[in-house]
Image (cartoon, grey):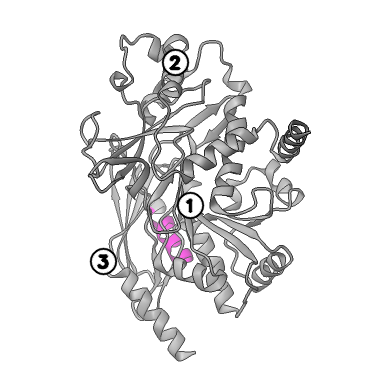
C-alpha cells in the first residue's frame, strides 16, 4: 500500500515537470542551494573529465592525470577553434545552442546536448522552489523584445507568461498591473533596470498591488541598486533576489535573503576562485577569477572555463572556504547611465543605448563612458567617420537628452583582455547614487 502511494506521488510529480526533466534532479539542486556548506562530488568531476579526455580533441591531446592540471580555457580559445571542443561524433546543427550578446567583447555560441537541457529544466524547478515560488506558476519577464526569438513570443502568452520590454506609456503599465492582480503569486524576473523602470512607473501612476500579488522578484544581467531593493520591499513586502548566470553555462547561483552573497548549485557546477594572474587557487576569502566546470554538458564540455567574472568565496569562523557561497560577485557589474541634468537627474537604462549601436555594422566594438551628468566619451573599434560620430551623439540625445559634451576616441585594440569582462557602459560619476537620492527626496517633498 505504502509503495503504491509513493509510486503514485512520484508519477504525479513527474507529470508536472517540464519535458525530460527529473523530480530527483530538481530535489538535488534545491538541497545543494539550501545546504550551509557543500562542494561538488569528486565522482561527478572525474566522470566529466574522463569523458572529455576520451572524446574531445582539445583534451585528447593533453597528458594530464589530475583535474587541477587541466588548463583553464576561455571564450576566445573556444571561439577560435570551436570544433576542438566538441565531443567526437557530435553534430552541432542538431544541438540546442545559446548565443551570447557579445557585451563582454566576444560573441559566442555554446551548444548543449539533450540530457543537459533536461537537467537545466529540472534545475529551474529546484531553484524556484529554493526561492520560495511556484515553478509552474505565472511569470512576468522583464527583458527586451530583441532578446526573444520570434518563435518564442507567442509561447509566452500560451504558457501564461507575460513580457514587459520597458515600455513607459500609461496604457501598458496599467495593463501589466491588471495582469498581475488577476494572478496572485506571480514571479517577476529579468534585467534589473527593466524591473526598476516598471516599479518606478507603478509609483508615478499611484499603482498599488495587494499583498501576495508578487511572490518573487529576481534580477539579473546587471547590478541591483538600493533604490530597486527599497521599491521591491515597499511595493511587494519581499526582498529582491539576484541570480548569477551566463549564456554559456546557465544559472549557477542565487542571492540569499540575508544579503548579497550567492548560494551556488554545486550539484551541477564545480566553481573555483583562481589568482588574477595564474591558474592556482586564490587564498581563502580573496578576490579572484571565477572558473566554472559544468558537470553535465557532454556535447561541448566546459572544464575549468574562465567566466570573465571576479568573485570571492565566503569563509567560515575558522578561515576555511565555504565552497558553495560567493561572498562577493565583482567584475560583472554594468553601471547605469544618469540622464537629465544635475538639478534633475534620473536613472536610465544603458540597454536603450546599446540596442541601436549594436545595429551599426561599422562598429566592431564599443564602450561608452559617462564622466559626469551630460558628459560622455565613446571609445570605438571602428573606422573614423564624422557621420558615425554624429549618429552616436544623436543616439545619446534621443535616449538620455541634455548632452553637454560627447567625445569620440578610436582604438585599434580589441576591447577586452584575458579574463577581464569588458563593460559596454562605465559610469565614472562618483556621487551618482547621492544625486539620485537627493532628487528622489526633493520630488517626494514637492509632491
- Left or right position of 411 against 30: left
Q: Position of residue 364 (x, y in %)?
A: 40, 40
* Residue under pointer 2: 52
Q: Secondary structure at mark 1?
A: strand
Relative to the observer, which residue lies in front, 298 or 318? 318
Is disc 1 in contact with disc 3, using a CB cutoff of under 8 Å? no
Please, what is the dominant secondary structure of the magenta stretch?
Answer: helix
Relative to the observer, which residue lies in front, 191 or 417? 191
* Residue under pointer 3: 430
Q: Earlier in the sequence, mark 2 or mark 3?
A: 2
In the displayed structure, 256 sits above or below 93; it is below
Q: Position of residue 182 (x, y in %)?
A: 74, 66
In the displayed structure, 441 sits above or below 6; it is below
Q: Earlier in the sequence, mark 1 or mark 3?
A: 1
| Quarter of the image that includes the N terminus | top right
Please say whether residue 390 is one of the residues in the magenta stretch: yes
Q: Residue at x 23, y 29 (%)?
A: 280
Q: Residue at x 50, y 65 (%)?
A: 196
Please say whether residue 41 is one of the residues in the magenta stretch: no
Q: Secondary structure at mark 3?
A: loop
* CA distance separating discs 2 and 1: 31 Å
* Residue under pointer 1: 220
Magenta-highlighted residues: 389-399
Amino acid at each position: 500500500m505504502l509503495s503504491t502511494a509513493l509510486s503514485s506521488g512520484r508519477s504525479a510529480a513527474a507529470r508536472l515537470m517540464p519535458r525530460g526533466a527529473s523530480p530527483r534532479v530538481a530535489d538535488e539542486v534545491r538541497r545543494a542551494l539550501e545546504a550551509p556548506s557543500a562542494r561538488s562530488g569528486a565522482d561527478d568531476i572525474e566522470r566529466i573529465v574522463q569523458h572529455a579526455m576520451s572524446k574531445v580533441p582539445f583534451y585528447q591531446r593533453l597528458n594530464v592525470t589530475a583535474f587541477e592540471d587541466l588548463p583553464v580555457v576561455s571564450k576566445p580559445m573556444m571561439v577560435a577553434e570551436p570544433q576542438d571542443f566538441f565531443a567526437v561524433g557530435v553534430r552541432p546543427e542538431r544541438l540546442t545552442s545559446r548565443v551570447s550578446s557579445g557585451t563582454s567583447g566576444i560573441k559566442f555560441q555554446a551548444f548543449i546536448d539533450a540530457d543537459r537541457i533536461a537537467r537545466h529544466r529540472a534545475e529551474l524547478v529546484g531553484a524556484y522552489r529554493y526561492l520560495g515560488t511556484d515553478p509552474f506558476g505565472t511569470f512576468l519577464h522583464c527583458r527586451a523584445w530583441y532578446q526573444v526569438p520570434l518563435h518564442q513570443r507567442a509561447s509566452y502568452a500560451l504558457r501564461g507568461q507575460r513580457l514587459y520590454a520597458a515600455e513607459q506609456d500609461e496604457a501598458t503599465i496599467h495593463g501589466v498591473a491588471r495582469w498581475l492582480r488577476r494572478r496572485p503569486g506571480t514571479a517577476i524576473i529579468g534585467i534589473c533596470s527593466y524591473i526598476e523602470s516598471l516599479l518606478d512607473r507603478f509609483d508615478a501612476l499611484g499603482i498599488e498591488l495587494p499583498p501576495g500579488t508578487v511572490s518573487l522578484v529576481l534580477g539579473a544581467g546587471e547590478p541591483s541598486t538600493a533604490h530597486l531593493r527599497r521599491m521591491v520591499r515597499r511595493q511587494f513586502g519581499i526582498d529582491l533576489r539576484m541570480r548569477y548566470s551566463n549564456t554559456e553555462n546557465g544559472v549557477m547561483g542565487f542571492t540569499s535573503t540575508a544579503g548579497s552573497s550567492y548560494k551556488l548549485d554545486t550539484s551541477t557546477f564545480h566553481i573555483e576562485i583562481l589568482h588574477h594572474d595564474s591558474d592556482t587557487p586564490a587564498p581563502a576569502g580573496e578576490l579572484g577569477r571565477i572558473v566554472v566546470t559544468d558537470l553535465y554538458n557532454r556535447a561541448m564540455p566546459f572544464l575549468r572555463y574562465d567566466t570573465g567574472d571576479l568573485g570571492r568565496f565566503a569563509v567560515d569562523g575558522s578561515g576555511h572556504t565555504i565552497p558553495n557561497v560567493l561572498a562577493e560577485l565583482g567584475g560583472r557589474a554594468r553601471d547605469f547611465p544618469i540622464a537629465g541634468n544635475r538639478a534633475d537627474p534620473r536613472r536610465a537604462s544603458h540597454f536603450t543605448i546599446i540596442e541601436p549601436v549594436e545595429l551599426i555594422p561599422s562598429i566592431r566594438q564599443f564602450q561608452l563612458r559617462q564622466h559626469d551628468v551630460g558628459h560622455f566619451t565613446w571609445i570605438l573599434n571602428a573606422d573614423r567617420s564624422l557621420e558615425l560620430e554624429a549618429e552616436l551623439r544623436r543616439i545619446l540625445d534621443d535616449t538620455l537628452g541634455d548632452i553637454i559634451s560627447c567625445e569620440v576616441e578610436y582604438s585599434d585594440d580589441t576591447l577586452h583582455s584575458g579574463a577581464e569582462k569588458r563593460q559596454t557602459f562605465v559610469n565614472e560619476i562618483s556621487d551618482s547614487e547621492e544625486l539620485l537620492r537627493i532628487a528622489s527626496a526633493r520630488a517626494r517633498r514637492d509632491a
